[in-house]
Image (tube, helix red, strand yellow):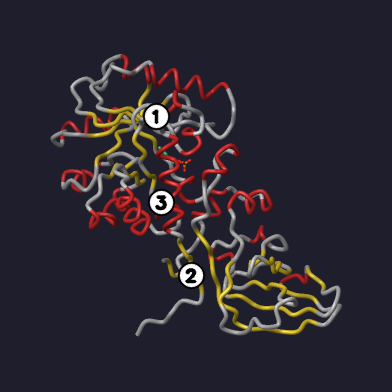
Amino acid sequence: MEIPAPLRLRIDRDALVSNWQALDRLSGAAACGAAVKANGYGLGASLVAETLVRAGCRDFFVASWAEAQALAPLGLTLSVLHGLRAEDVPAARAGLARPVLNTPEQIGRWRDSGGGACDVMVDTGMNRLGVSVEAVQGGLLDGLTIETLISHLACADEDVAMNARQRAAFASLAGRTDARRMSLANSAGIGLGAGYHFDLTRPGLALYGGIPRPDMAELLRQVAFPEAQILQRRHVPAGETVGYNATWTAPADTEVAILNLGYADGYRRALSGLGAAVVDGVRLPVLGRVSMDLLAIDVTVRPDLAEGDWLTMGYDLATASAASGVSQYELLTGLGRRFGRG
Ligand SMILES: *Cc1c(COP(=O)(O)O)cnc(C)c1O
């Protein structure tokens, strides 16, 4: 017996493909891959990867070997960004994905286990994962069969001098290893221009409708649409309040719908009083606090909406992020397990 969920995340596959194609075009001569870590930024990694591979995407990035395993049935070319722990060696030897080697220890572990094609992350100033530029110049990677030499930009969503410094540090390694390809740009990095594209780009956020830089807004479409069912419709007389801590007081008699959606689903409490459902282009604002599993909206202008009806929440990422102060990345990756996805 399958019980249908009272909330779902509608994925606009055409918009997803359109975003990838736009980023592919913007990447110029470089190939355009896809970061599908964190369950495809919350949208569902299999659904995303299946859609993008059909569109022509050939390089996929996940964080962990467990994420690679979840995608194994699709037979994709996968890279695991978080490298190769001792515990990961059997999965790597089984050919589940290519490791992105981040430390001299991981490089040794990969060589000792038999070596073969791998990717390598070089740190060019973010000081997160990766081996140093100096170590690579000093020969750390000599003899290694490298498919893609990777680095990651810390501030590509800002116009700061650090971008050019990272680019120059990475470019200085061209020809120093036998890497078949070099890859630097995430979503925002693609927008920095041809000098940042090298051979392969690795967008995540922008694929899913996030706007990494204002100048890329025109190219990208919303992909993820949270939808929830009305559980109850009620009349709230003027002067009464709605929700926890009674933060909203009805200025006049108000018709209210209670939706099956809350912060435990990733619909953040920061959207209390700011978010809205959007029905036929009309905003029906969230009233008072978002609860764990529920929220209230004003349906006074829509006498037709009733128990059991489905409503779509406004979830334009740039707008929701600006209003709530929650990053676009968190608004996506927080979308929870209770959504039916499709
Ligand atoms: C997450 C990630 C990406 C994608 O970044 P976006 O900002 O979402 O485009 C690319 N490369 C690496 C190494 C990452 O960790």
Q: Which label is found at residue 17?
A: 3
* Mark 2 residue CB less than 8 A from any atom of ligand 1: no
Neighbor class of circle 3 (other Cα within 10 Å; few <14, some 14-19, many 20+) is many
* Mark 1 residue CB less than 8 A from any atom of ligand 1: no
Please, what is the three-letter code of the amino acid marked with disc 1? Answer: Ser
Q: Mark 2 points at which residue?
A: 8
Residue at left offset 52%, top offset 47%: 220
Residue 52: where, in percent of width, then height? 35, 51
Q: Quadrant of residue 113?
A: top left
Relative to 165, does residue 44 appear above or below in the rendering? below
**Mark 3: which secondary structure?**
helix
Question: Disc 2 or 1, which lies upstream in sequence?
Answer: 2
Q: Name the residue under label 1.
A: 151
**Mark 1: which secondary structure?**
loop
Distance CA(mark 2)–CA(mark 1): 36 Å
Residue 256: where, in percent of width, then height? 71, 78
Pair 2/1: label in front: 2
Residue 165: where, in percent of width, then height? 49, 19
Left or right position of 146 against 336: left
Relative to 331, does residue 128 appear above or below in the rendering? above
Relative to 64, does residue 28 appear above or below in the rendering? above
Q: Quadrant of residue 77?
A: top left
**Mark 2: which secondary structure?**
strand
Please, what is the three-letter code of the amino acid marked with disc 2? Answer: Arg
Pair 2/3: label in front: 3
Distance CA(mark 1)–CA(mark 3): 25 Å
